[in-house]
Image (cartoon, grey):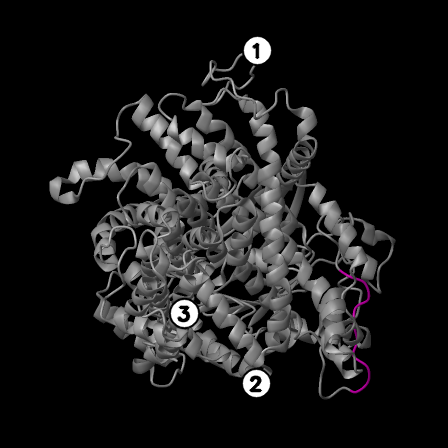
Amino acid sequence: MTAGPVLEVRDASLVFTQDRNELRLIDHVSFEVAPGETLGLVGESGSGKSMTALSIMGFVGRKRSQRLEGSIRFRGQELVGLPESQYRKLRGNDIAMVFQEPMTSLDPSFTIGFQIAEGIRLHQGLSRKDALKRVVEVLDLVRIPQAHRRVNSYPHEFSGGMRQRVLIAMALANDPELIIADEPTTALDVSIQAQILDLLGSLQRDLGLAMLFITHNMGVVADICDRVAVMYAGEVVEQGGVHEVFGSPRMPYTERLLASMPRLDRRGELEWIPGAPPAVDDRPVGCRFQPRCAHAVQACGEPQALRIVAPDRLARCWRSEELELGESA
Amino acid sequence: MTTRAIAAILPPKRAAGRRRFLQRFVRQPLAMTGLVYLVLIALVAALAPLLVPHDPNVQDLRGVLQPPSAEHLLGTDELGRDVLSRLIMGSRVSLLAAVQGTAVAIAIGLPLGLIAGYVRGRTDRVVMILTDTIMALPALVLAMAIVAIWGPSLTNAMLAIGIITAPRALRLVRGSVLHIREETYIEASRSIGTPDWKIIVKHVLPNAAAPLIVFTAVLAGTVMLMEAGLSFIGLGVQPPEASWGAMLGTSFRYLSRAPILAIYPGLAIAVTVLALNLVGDGVRDSIGKQVQR
Amino acid sequence: MFSVLLPRLARTVPVFLLVTVCVFGLTSLLPGDPAAALAGENPTPEQVEEIRRQLGLDRPLWEQYVVWMGKLFQGDLGVSLYNGQPVAQAILGRLPVTLSLALVAMIFTIVVGLLGGILAAARRGGPVDKVTTVLSTIGIATPNFWIGLLLIILFSFTLGWLPAVGYVPPTQGLWPWLSHILLPGIALGAAGAAELLRQTRSSMIDTLGQDYIRTGRAQGLGSAAIFWRRALRNASLPLVTVAAFQLAMLLGGVVIIEKIFSLPGLGSLVIDSVFQKDLPVIQGVVLVNALIVLVLNLITDFVYTLLNPKVRSS
């Protein structure tokens, strides 16, 4: 295992050209994922978190109308501009992705064994028998009962939670180094959510995987992530270890996100953030959160840079040090 | 929250939908072209006697199968009659026949489909078996058989075609009704005691109308093709009258001598059916997503 | 699987019975008296009555029907009023011609329709897609006999490549058979190909937009594997129904095509017998045709069940 980060995103921007307008769906985003670590990428809908995941996988940003700028390095290899044929060797092999909709993400016409084996045979070149053995292995890993029999079952014979397990098994089949999970529990019942998160957590620990976990739910982040990067309107606005960020947020948006989490030990009304994130083509020049920020002042109209405010702590707010945010305030 | 629950009980707004539909329709070039063509050809058919350069039935046995000339823009046929005039008159016959056949099909299919779909139960089953039976029999052959028995004439042919294509209309209507009757506003209407027939007329019918209109355009095309087929072999319109299909039929006998005679009527049929299909597609694409199922 | 097919079979039986009733009923619709027609010139009432008794026409209608059905199951479809030949024999004699025609048309429809639709979907929005869409839209609107006429004008008269009339059985050589059956086959299959192409394209595009295709890409599968394995398999389900429908329509279209190309098949038999009011022949052909359609429907259901795992395993 290399000592460096598994995933290194530097100033990545996804530029979408429409009618001669350039829209930056993600704007100079930077973060890293170290080996064996889970980084949470958190934000509202439209913050650009899913786009980031798709960019890393190479599903977007490969057309003239949809450019990817900056650098995305996986184990040191540059992914931006990588030819499709080489990208395919990485997908499902070294980098695997788990999507949000387990109900529709499996092909209804083939058995789950066949679908998982397809990826195994493609990347590992195993015979059908050996591939099937591996399929049973990973199905066991994700705790699907009677794996050796269910290999021949069709997707419609599984519940939503089970299907998500199958998809996770599919992701693990070729021993990836990085798993990108894009809101894997959002479409599931609450009780199943806990199970899946539990599973992901233990798998990650046991297999030493690096994971990029995308969600809009701060509660989930607290549960499963080591570090967190908060996104807003296409930018990363805060980054750091989960304990530190949750304990003392350094950016008003983060603080608002934390405050809006429903908690058992707090009574009273749920807090919410007034207003809505800016549209992609209608972003304010300065701090993008300014229109909704309770602490905004004149100087917030200047463009804000992501600054180091403490060891391993980044925040995009020039008032980070002087504001006292969070519980400790 | 409550507004949404109430909205589920109210029948969908139709007036606003209609305006939006028209707006969307006019923006589709293909559909509009089809519509323009149909209007034009309908005008030609209506004004045919005024538009013909020559009497379509006058024969000139010394000038048969002539190529196009200044006198006869499209040449003459096997009896020396002016092709262009016959083509124009033929539009009348063909279009009228198509309207007749379609009307019969809808007159049978619509009420039966409404009833079968709404009432369900044994009525529905009986109707479906009848429908399946007719659809199992070969359309053209059945039409031919019926016309042979009743005697060849255009009216008989269109009646036969109408009866044979009615099952398709019936199935479509029934399908729509099956879907609509599950809507909450139907239930609400029933719960306040509205009689069934009133529900069908006021609520079910207008909402089933949209897909039916699309279907009607396509059906008219199918009917036209079937009439052309029957007339081609001589079982449809009888001479001296001629539809485009009949003209094609007679041209067949002189195919080697004057192949061009086969091109005009066939082209007329193809273009008209095409226009009907395009309009049908256009209507379908212009229906809002909430109505389209 | 059979649990699905048995009720379907059960539903087909009453339909078939009803078909036989309809076909039988055609007789009673005919104006005039068949017995009198057969009796010849100036028959005496006794002679007509005798013939009527011989034909069994004096029995009640339902009894005639039962007798007729009985004969049906023995393969006796009656005798032609025109030339006295047994109907069953006439039909069997002409069946190979019509089947040849239908076969060629079927192959044309499926090959052109499927491949065209797949190609159009794969290169969606490109020139191939636009051209095929235009061609298929036109193809649906065109009467198949007109296409036949045009093909004759082009390939027989102008280019002289293929004959315009006649049928040659394959026993006399493959190319002679093919050269005579190719043009009519194409004319017959064109409309079906156009419709199938549209549906295939639409189904493929729908399928390609599904989430499981995205999963396949995430696994690193190449576009070829995704396209030909996962997409096609799922897209083909609705196409089975469409294809079967088009094939059933083929049988109706043979009539005029056979006339144009002078093929001695069932179609021209029907036309002749319609003009001769030869009812037993008409009945026979309609019946055989309906039977084929019903069998085709059953086969379609069977194939659909095979392809659709949801129906299979439940």
Label 3 or label 2, whichever lies nearer to me, is 3
* Residues tagged by mark 2 and mark 1 found on one chain of the structure: no
User: Residue beneath label 2, please?
Assistant: A191
Magenta-colored span: A267-276
- Cα gap from disc 3 to disc 2, whole angstroms: 61 Å
Q: What is the chain letter for disc 1?
A: B
Label 2 or label 1, whichever lies nearer to me, is 1
Indicate the amino acid at tag 1. Ala
- Cα gap from disc 2 to disc 1, whole angstroms: 86 Å
Q: Is residue B29 above or below residue B21?
A: above
- Which quarter shows the C terminus of chain B? bottom right
Q: What is the chain letter for disc 2?
A: A
The residue nearer to you, when weighing C65 against A17, is C65
Q: Is residue A23 above or below residue A273?
A: above
Which numbered dot is residue A25? none
Q: Is residue A244 above or below residue C133?
A: below
Residue A84: x and y in percent read 41, 47
Indicate the amino acid at tag 3. Val
For the residue labelled by badge 3, is the local secondary structure a helix, a strand or a loop? helix
* Residue at image location 26% in from the left, 26% down from the top: C161
Residue B256: x and y in percent read 35, 23
For the residue labelled by badge 1, is the local secondary structure a helix, a strand or a loop? loop
Going by the picture, which residue comes out furthest to the right? A298
User: Residue beneath label 1, please?
Assistant: B70
User: Residue beneath label 3, please?
Assistant: C21
The residue nearer to you, when weighing B190 against C171, is C171
